[in-house]
Amino acid sequence: MSGDDSMIADSARIFLSRIGGVARARKLRDSGMAFDAGAWNEMAKLGWFGLVVPEEAGGLGLGGHELVALMEALGAQLAGEPVGESIAASVLLSRAEGLSSLLEEVIAGSAIVASVLDASFKLAGGRVRGASRPVVNLAQATHALIEITGENGAVYVVPLKSAGVELRTQATVDGRTVSELHLDLSSEVLSRIEMQNVSLALGNVQAVARLAAAAYLVGLADAAFAIALEYLKTRKQFGVAIGSFQALQHRAATVFVRIASVRALISECARTFGTERLDAASAAAACAASAMALQVTKECIQFHGAIGFADEHDIGLYLRRAMSTIASIGDAGSCLDAFSKAASVGTEKISSTA
Amino acid sequence: MIRPETAQETAFRAEVRSWFEANLQQHLRNLTFRPAPKESMAWYGALYENGWIAPHWPKSFGGMGASAEEQVILFEESARIGAPDIPTQGLNHIGPLLMKLGTPRQQAFHLPRILSGEGVWCQGYSEPGSGSDLASVQTRGEVRGGEIVINGQKIWTTWGHHANWMYALVRAIPGEKKKNGITFVLLDMNTKGITRRPIRTIAGDDEFCEVFFDDVAVPLSNVVGEVDQGWRVATSLLDEERIRIGTPLLPLRALARLRAVMKHNGLSNDREWQRRLARSEIAVETVTAAYFQCLERFETGNAAGGESSYLKILATEVTQDIVDLVQEAAGPLRAVKVPSAGSDARVDFSEMYLQSRRLSIYGGSNEIQRSILAAQVLGLQGARR
């Protein structure tokens, strides 16, 4: 890291520690609230939701490396608020016509726009109908970005307080929620997004969300490993630190390799921010980070032995948060398909896939 | 690579691709993992003539002085066209070591010969009793007047029977333990008293050999560094050497083979296999990313000691994972040694799979690398076995 990204990382780390760090994630989970409105407003004041929005549109005008630094810091302290989702939506809102007031609200934290792209919504006879697949953190959103397919296909913003909007919400293992969006409402409630090449812009929203989640998972895995490493150095059995056993040393080394290599991949991905390559790169990052985070957090539980299986120990929170984060970026198959598709087409083809 | 290319890099890639197309003869493409010396050295010579044999060497020593990106472009294009593997002991190991620690005379004599391929090198480290425990080498190197006289045996010497030079670790006083008392010496393989016996590998090639030394006299001017200070010499470039083992070249080659086998067996349009291929491509991109990062961290002096071990583990295990898929895609043909004629492109089912067993053994086994990571990077002390 150098410059802006390390500044962002430092200020995020300090802020998140101040508001309670991992203990806050546990408290939120126990309270069933999943979302800390006070913290959210403070995050807005730090400018996070406008991180990649151009300065002339009211944002900080930063790029991929800063996004990765911020998301890693959030993952490290298990902050569960939909920061990545908000940043992803801001990418589209900042380019669309006539949505500057919604963008301002997103940057201010008073609106949260979820991207509900894995869905089939149809417009017929003046009504919009359909349902989405489950979306993590949708319950906190005030608006949804949806795509209507078929005739008159376009991208719309749906205010989620409207009549005819139903969320079917379930709790996740880490205190977040996952909701299906069911719509049966008049199309007049929706605002159509006017912009050139809207499907490209939607792809970009998804790519930014994938990069954000991948970075979050790296921060999460790294923090879990730091706890496990400390445990390996202090926990004694047979009169010695368990970290002196070669069987555990080698597994720890494997964990290190997994985290370090995926972090390197994500740093490459950050370089593609704002280029056509971001689609393929972010799909790669999401696939790699998902598999890595599960492997690492499971290993970290194993390193702890029985206490790792106990809810009272924090180490299990990391696996559970990894699960809901992975759920937010789609299944492995769809990420792999997205990578294959994006990597092998267009002028920005990725050479190793040729 | 995922990293966006500059216009200059894109132009370089195009230049490499068309030059490879024009200069790599068909019969040299898609050979086995380790082609015969004749084929390998033909390609080596062509790269030398074109100035591309030593991308990572500085220009001052006759190298290309290539950027990390240009190096990766060369790897990707080599794998893409199926270029033959070339010997690397000179280019990646003794060459850089001599640049750092060799005398001006040693540099002036050996470096140009490494570049031209006239000097083909092997590494005399392992012995029957010294594998992972390299500091226990017992081959004797006794100073007598202006010479060092060598007696003993080396083994698992890759290309030892094709090489004309060896760099070796020998010990002045036999029985003495460990790191003091080791001398790093350069040997002309045609010196009197050297006997070589090839050893066949599980992949069916005479890939490595045993080397016996019977009163082999080498001038003291062939010692690198000081007599008895050879351990420091041998380990001074370990990080750089592991980075060279951890390049994306091997995983890229494995990927090319996976694509070829999928195509041959009609799996290219199978969705499940496309996903497996995508997963492998992403794994290779991860190696490339890690390679960039390691080079950058070493160049800027930000690397932790032992960090390069991670690259060796990563690149070799990604390669092995991909060749596991090659085997699976091969199906009932998985055990076929040399595919029968019929298609113009050579398809490998089993060769790289067998060859790849060595990747996690050579250059310090992956278990040794994990122990290094644990001790030096993770701070886990006191290895208990």
Image (cartoon, rainbow, N blue to C red):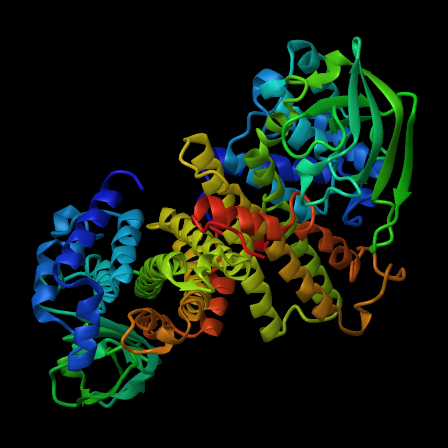
The residue lying at 58 percent from left, 61 percent from top is: B280
**Coordinates of residue A89 in the picture (x, y in percent):** 23, 64
> Can residue A184 be seen from the camera position used here?
yes
The residue lying at 73 percent from left, 27 percent from top is: B171
**Residue A262 found in image quarter:** bottom left
* Residue B360 in the figure: left or right of residue A154: right
Q: Residue furthest front?
A: A239
**Coordinates of residue B383 in the picture (x, y in percent):** 53, 52
Q: Nearer the viewer, residue A110 or A96?
A: A110
The residue lying at 55 percent from left, 50 percent from top is: B371
* Residue A221 in the figure: left or right of residue B247: left
What quarter of the picture does the C terminus of chain B occupy? bottom right
* Residue B313 in the figure: left or right of residue B138: left
* Residue A326 in the figure: left or right of residue B135: left
**Residue B66 found in image quarter:** top right
Q: Nearer the viewer, residue B177 or B191?
A: B177
Q: Nearer the viewer, residue B320 or A239?
A: A239
The residue lying at 23 percent from left, 72 percent from top is: A114
| Position above or below: A170 against A246 | below
**Coordinates of residue B166 in the picture (x, y in percent):** 78, 28
**Residue A163 found in image quarter:** bottom left
**Coordinates of residue B215 in the picture (x, y in percent):** 89, 22
Q: Nearer the viewer, residue B187 or B81?
A: B187
